[in-house]
Image (tube, grey):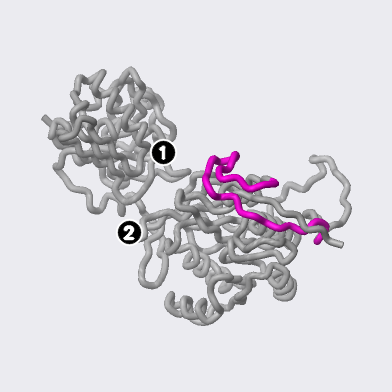
């Protein structure tokens, strides 16, 4: 006979406790422990082999041939996945509500189905009629795919065995529940068990599986952190809801590069690829304005040119404000300290605002020099040269350090018609740059400011 057991699980980090506590010891969150009832011996867990006993074999005897990837015909999605969808892979897609996750996966299902792949789209949030209406709105004429509105995992598995699809989409994992787990759908236990079951199905049958995950108000995927460790790839769909551009970022990928991005534009008929994101991000760049600088940043294997803006103005408060959007706030504070100490700029009585145009987030240190140039340009009220691209990392002593993949950055600047590139002196050695672009090497921040800022 099955035995019932009560426990309390944190809905943020998955910490389990035999009694209720107001504050979770695992993540220090308040009022996140929820009572869950589990059934001991209610069902038997099966491994990836489907319960069949297998012997361990030497690694040298394992065939190294890779399965052919499935081409989604969406170039930006293929880039993020590492070249296409791998059969048997389990991919988690997260993002804010209304950002376009379901739209992207519906378009992916449509393109794969037209290539002959059998696609099963399972929705626990919409009815089949709603999915059909969305497909009609996106101008998808009679997509040859299977649609199922269900959230019972046992019934979903039965339909999977019946349809035998090549691609499976679950929208979303928080709505799916396992009947053997006595807790509400979306709880830590349900999400963990449902994902483990889907992983077993995907690996055992070789089905490429996408699962949609809701995000919390902090921006992380709701549910236990173990969810991201179980899947093969984690894709985050980013962007402002009121902005037309969307960024698909891979933060984990067992079959390709991490931190790769794909850029889409939301239009009336769905998401469209942005083939040249640098040109889009620089389309509205003002010329002859103080505080505007162009930087070449690497997003995965792709160089992207974006505009970095800064505004420095006298403060009316005792403590000046420091605000940064798209770059690390602490990094901006460090660069301003270097400008004060090494360049003699009195920024301690100035408010400073730094923004990356286009909604992109830049995390690499190669954008340090562009931040410094933008802040100095706004502080001195002298415009930068609109034909310059600035690249470099700044140290605490004011030196400009070398960066990686400098040739790709320079060629991207040349492709968009820029005349000069200011880079670290270290990167000059061995650089093969196009003939009609001037490359200037600098050793410290002072040399860079003298080259870029007019007046």
Q: Quarter holding the C terminus?
A: top left
**Which residue is more in the foreground, 18 or 238?**
18
Measured from the top left, where is residue 105 in percent x and y? 52, 65
Q: Please name the residue that numbered disc 1 is placed on.
A: 363
Q: Which mark is residue 208?
A: none
Asked which quadrant contains residue 34, the reply is: bottom right
- Residue 272 in the image, given as x and y percentages of width and height: 40, 64
Q: Is residue 67 left or right of residue 388?
A: right
Residue interval drawn in magenta: 18-42
What's the residue at 80%, 40% (across, down)? 60
Gap in angstroms between the C-alphas marked 1 and 2:
21 Å
Quadrant for the N terminus, please. Answer: bottom right
Main secondary structure of the magenta stretch: loop
| Image x and y of residue 186, in percent | 60, 60
**Residue 19 on the magenta segment:** yes
The residue identified by callout 2 is 243
What residue is drawn where x is 35% and y is 36%?
Answer: 329
Residue 263 in the magenta stretch? The answer is no
Closer to the camera, 28 or 83?
28
Compared across the picture, whether 103 is left or right of 356 comes to right
- Identified at 43% across, 45% down, the residue is 302
Q: Is residue 198 above or below residue 443?
A: below
The answer to which of marks 1 and 2 sits earlier in the sequence is 2
Question: Residue 88 or 98: which is nearer the viewer?
Answer: 98
How many discs mark residues in the rendered view?
2
**SS type, badge 1:** loop
Q: Is residue 187 left or right of residue 415?
A: right
Tell me if I can see residue 228 in this picture.
no
């Amino acid at each position: 006979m099955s035995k019932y057991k009560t426990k309390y699980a944190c809905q943020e980090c998955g910490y389990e406790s035999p009694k209720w506590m107001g504050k979770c010891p695992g993540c220090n969150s308040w009022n996140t422990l929820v009572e869950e009832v589990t059934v001991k011996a209610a069902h038997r867990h099966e491994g990836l082999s489907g319960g069949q006993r297998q012997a361990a074999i030497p690694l040298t005897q394992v065939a190294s041939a890779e399965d052919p990837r499935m081409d989604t015909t969406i170039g930006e999605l293929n880039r993020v996945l590492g070249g296409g969808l791998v059969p048997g892979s389990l991919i988690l897609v997260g993002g804010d509500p209304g950002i376009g996750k379901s739209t992207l996966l519906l378009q992916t299902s449509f393109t794969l189905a037209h290539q002959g792949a059998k696609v099963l789209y399972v929705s626990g949030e919409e009815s089949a009629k709603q999915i059909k209406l969305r497909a009609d709105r996106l101008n998808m004429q009679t997509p040859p795919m299977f649609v199922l509105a269900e959230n019972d995992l046992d019934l979903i598995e039965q339909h999977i065995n019946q349809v035998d699809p090549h691609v499976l989409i679950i929208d979303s994992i928080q709505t799916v529940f396992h009947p053997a787990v006595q807790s509400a759908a979306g709880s830590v236990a349900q999400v963990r068990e449902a994902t483990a079951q889907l992983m077993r199905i995907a690996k055992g049958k070789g089905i490429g599986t996408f699962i949609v995950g809701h995000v919390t108000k902090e921006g992380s995927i709701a549910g236990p952190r173990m969810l991201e460790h179980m899947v093969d790839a984690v894709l985050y769909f980013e962007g402002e809801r009121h902005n037309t551009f969307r960024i698909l970022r891979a933060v984990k990928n067992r079959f390709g590069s991490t931190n790769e991005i794909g850029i889409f534009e939301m239009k009336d008929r769905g998401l469209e690829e942005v083939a040249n994101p640098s040109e889009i991000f620089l389309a509205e760049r003002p010329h002859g304005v103080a505080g505007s600088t162009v930087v070449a940043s690497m997003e995965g294997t792709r160089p992207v040119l974006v505009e970095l803006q800064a505004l420095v103005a006298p403060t009316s408060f005792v403590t000046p404000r420091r605000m940064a959007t798209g770059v690390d706030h602490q990094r901006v504070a460090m660069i301003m300290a270097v400008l004060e100490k090494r360049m003699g700029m009195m920024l301690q009585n100035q408010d400073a605002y730094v923004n990356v145009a286009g909604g992109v987030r830049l995390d690499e240190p190669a954008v340090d020099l562009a931040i410094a140039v933008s802040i100095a340009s706004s502080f001195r009220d002298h415009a930068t040269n609109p034909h310059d691209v600035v690249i470099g990392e700044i140290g605490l002593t004011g030196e400009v350090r070398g960066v990686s993949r400098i040739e790709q950055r320079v060629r991207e600047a040349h492709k968009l018609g820029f005349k000069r590139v200011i880079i670290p002196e270290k990167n000059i050695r061995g650089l093969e740059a196009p003939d009609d672009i001037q490359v200037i090497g600098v050793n410290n921040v002072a040399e860079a400011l003298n080259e870029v800022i007019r007046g």
